[in-house]
Every structure is written in structure tokens, then in C-alpha cells.
Amino acid sequence: MKKLVVLTGAGISAESGLKTFRDSDGLWEGYNIEDVATPEAWEHNPVLVQEFYNARRKSVLEAKPNAAHYALAQLEEKYDVTIITQNIDDLHERAGSTKVVHLHGIITRSQSSIDAKLTYPIDGWELRMDEVCELGSPLRAHVVWFGEDVPMIEPAARVCTSAEIFMLVGSSLAVYPAAGLISYVGREVPKYIIDPKIPEVRINGPLIKIQEKASIGVPALVNELLKN
């Protein structure tokens, strides 16, 4: 089976009703990102941060995968597919994809506030302040905040080096280090970019641009790939 690697961003989840992480006004769901998505925010007002992610988790659990998510899962019929996602939702998994690398964590899990390697499933959408890890530290959302390391970036880069086909879906390539992953893909590897606004990329080799939203462009491309 050919190795097919897909990097997905906020655009694919937006079509399931989930707001993009950073809109043009610098806010996320009406909040300043600095107030809810940094270690300093957690230190200053952990209750606000916990409430914010509880609300985001509730939205994620109420959302449903869209045609793009299901199409990517369908690719596993013929390809060895790994999805690398910048998104913190679980829509790829719910659509049926079996190999998903979450660069920025996944909101349906919690983590220790002193050891990010300690993660736990969350029963439902609410994480309470009195819930603690095995070390006795309060649990927080399993999400990478601004100013924190991205521990999955190296495994993701290794996956990209093995790609025989590469797809970029719904990402503006504006957030680093995720935006640099495309540079790990081999020069000769066919690369597809699907987005209503194709981001500027400086790469050598074959590049196919599909200027469509994910729910239209991805199923169309998947149908073509499954024919080959």
C-alpha cells in the first residue's frame, strides 16, 4: 500500500460548525487567546480556562464529521493513510480514520497540569477543578497552549518523510511548527492542496491546487485516488 499523509487544519472542522482557532480579530469564541490558551492564563485564572475548554469540548461532542472527514477515512481501503491534524477535535476518529496524529492535543482527553505525559479520558464534556491526576495536580484539557512545546512535531515530521502522496486540507500554514511539515515531504512526491484560499507555499516538485472547501474538494480527490 502506498503511504498517503494528510495534514489537516481548522478549515476541515469549520464545516462541521467548529469555529477556527484564531479568527481575523484575534479572538477565539469571543475570548482573547492570551486569556485562555497560555500557561500564564491557567496560572492566573484556571477556572476561566477550564470553563472555556469545557464549552469547546461540549461543542466538539455535539459536532459531527462532514463529507471530508468520511472521505479521508475511505482512503484506507487502498492506501496506508496517516492523518496529521492541527485540530483538537476527534472528528477524524469518529469518521473512521485509524491513524491520527494530533499535533496540538485532543480536547476529549485531560492531562496533568504538571506532567503533560499523564493523560486521561474525560467522561462527558465537563472537566471539574477538583479532578486531579495521580500526582495530585489538577487536570486540564489535553491541548498544547501558546508557549508550550509541541511534543508530536518530531513524530509528525518522520511521517512526512515517508509520504508517497501528500495532501494539505483546510490549513493556511500560518501556525508553526506545523507549517514547516510540508518541507519534510520528498521533492518528487505528488502534493495536493485543498482550500478555498490556497496558501502560498515554497516547494519544489509536483503541486496540484484544488481551490474548494474541504467537503467538496476532498471527496472529489479521494474518488480519483481510489480509481488509480
Image (cartoon, rainbow, N blue to C red):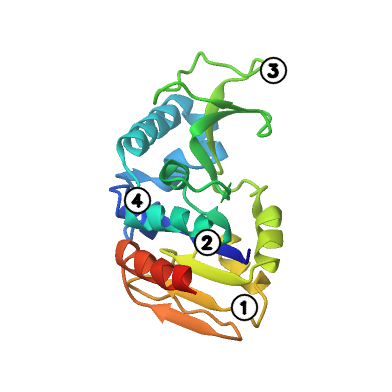
Marks 3 & 4, CB-CB < 8 Å contact: no
At mark 1, the secondary structure is loop
**Residue 86 — which label?**
none
- The residue carrying pointer 2 sits among few (fewer than 14), some (14 to 19) or many (20 or more) residues within 10 Å by Cα, namely many
Position of residue 20 measured from the top left corner of the image (x, y, whole percent): 36, 53
| Residue type at the position of mark 2 | Leu
Q: Nearer the viewer, residue 138 or 84?
A: 84
At mark 2, the secondary structure is strand
- The residue carrying pointer 1 sits among few (fewer than 14), some (14 to 19) or many (20 or more) residues within 10 Å by Cα, namely some
Marks 4 & 1, CB-CB < 8 Å contact: no
Compute the Cα span from label 2 to label 4. Answer: 24 Å
Residue corresponding to mark 2: 7
| Residue type at the position of mark 1 | Val
Residue at left 52%, top 61%?
Answer: 7
Q: Nearer the viewer, mark 4 or mark 1?
A: 1
**Residue 135 — which label?**
3
Residue corresponding to mark 4: 27
Position of residue 117 measured from the top left corner of the image (x, y, whole percent): 68, 33
Q: Nearer the viewer, residue 38 or 88?
A: 88
| Residue type at the position of mark 4 | Leu
Residue at left 58%, top 63%?
Answer: 5
In the rendered structure, the answer to whether residue 73 lies left or right of residue 100 reads left
